[in-house]
Amino acid sequence: MKADFHAAFVIHTRPFRNTSQIIELFTRDVGLVSVVARGSTRAGAKGRSPLATQLQQFTPLQISWSGRSELKTLTKVEATGRAHRLVGRRLICGLYLNELLIKLLHHGDPHSTLFDRYSLLLAELVIENEAQLLRIFELQLLEEVGFGFDLNYDIAGDLIEAEYSYCYYPEDGLARVKQSSDINPSALQISGTTLKVLRQLLGQSNFASNIESLPRADQELSVKLQQEAKQLLRAALDYHLPSEVQSRKLLQR
């Protein structure tokens, strides 16, 4: 019987018994899948296990498995392209993306569009500005898993406009600041211009070009918008994440 192959990326591994690993996969058509890679840590003739060499993060794979329980057994793995060579800070960014996927996605819940965006982002992460790419993926991830917020209308039903500022409330959304008394010191305040840029980003892939296309956008404005976008998306993620994101600590160093 011909094996069913699934496009996949390894997003986490952990030891299992003496010579095996449990591999967390992000697949295009099934979502998150946990598989046992039996013998993957057993040394081969040249030292490292050939299977362990294949099962590396950031490598596009085709994988098959067997079993009816939640924990499957890996049967075959083939690389379909070269590993995306992320080093230094870009490697930490990749690990951050993988940690977000593990914490926010559910096993067996497919997200083919998000998978395609993740695959594209890994390729871009090698050469592009990583901060801009992270904002795009954070925004698209929130939208994909149902935690996105309305970037068109505030909580009063009014159209979000660039000339206003807004307070962000995770439970409700964005509230327009019409006067100083509307400002809640405990709420994150975001410019309408930043929200406009984020709205344009959904389905797009270049944060910098969207910022620079705005009227009168100069370097100082671009930096301010990027910082606000980072604060807003991190606040939204933190509200929904079940636990702290460890890799983010490394990004903040």
Image: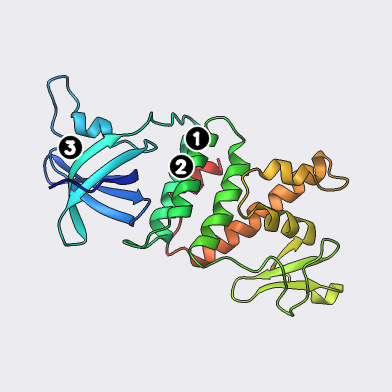
Label 2 SS:
helix
Q: Nearer the viewer, mark 1 or mark 3?
A: 1
* Residue at x 61%, y 42% (from the top left corner): 131
Furthest toward the front, the residue is 1
Question: Residue 190 location, x and y as percent?
Answer: 74, 61
Q: Residues within 10 Å of mark 2 (few under 14, many from 20)?
A: some
Q: Note whether residue 145 is visible.
A: yes
The answer to which image quadrant residue 129 occupies is top right
Q: Residues within 10 Å of mark 3 (few under 14, many from 20)?
A: many
Residue that mark 3 sits on: 40
Residue that mark 1 sits on: 123
How far apart marks 2 and 1 lie (CA) works out to 7 Å
Question: Residue 212 location, x and y as percent?
Answer: 78, 42
Question: Residue 28 location, x and y as percent?
Answer: 38, 51
Say which amino acid is labelled 2.
Ser
Say which amino acid is labelled 3.
Ser
* C-beta proximity under 8 Å, tags 2 and 1: yes
Q: Nearer the viewer, mark 3 or mark 2?
A: 2
Residue 163's place in the image compared with 5, above or below, is below
Question: Residue 42 location, x and y as percent?
Answer: 13, 33
- State which quarter of the image contains the C terminus: top right
Say which amino acid is labelled 1.
Ala
Residue 241's place in the image compared with 250, above or below, is below
* Residue at x 65%, y 56% (from the top left corner): 231
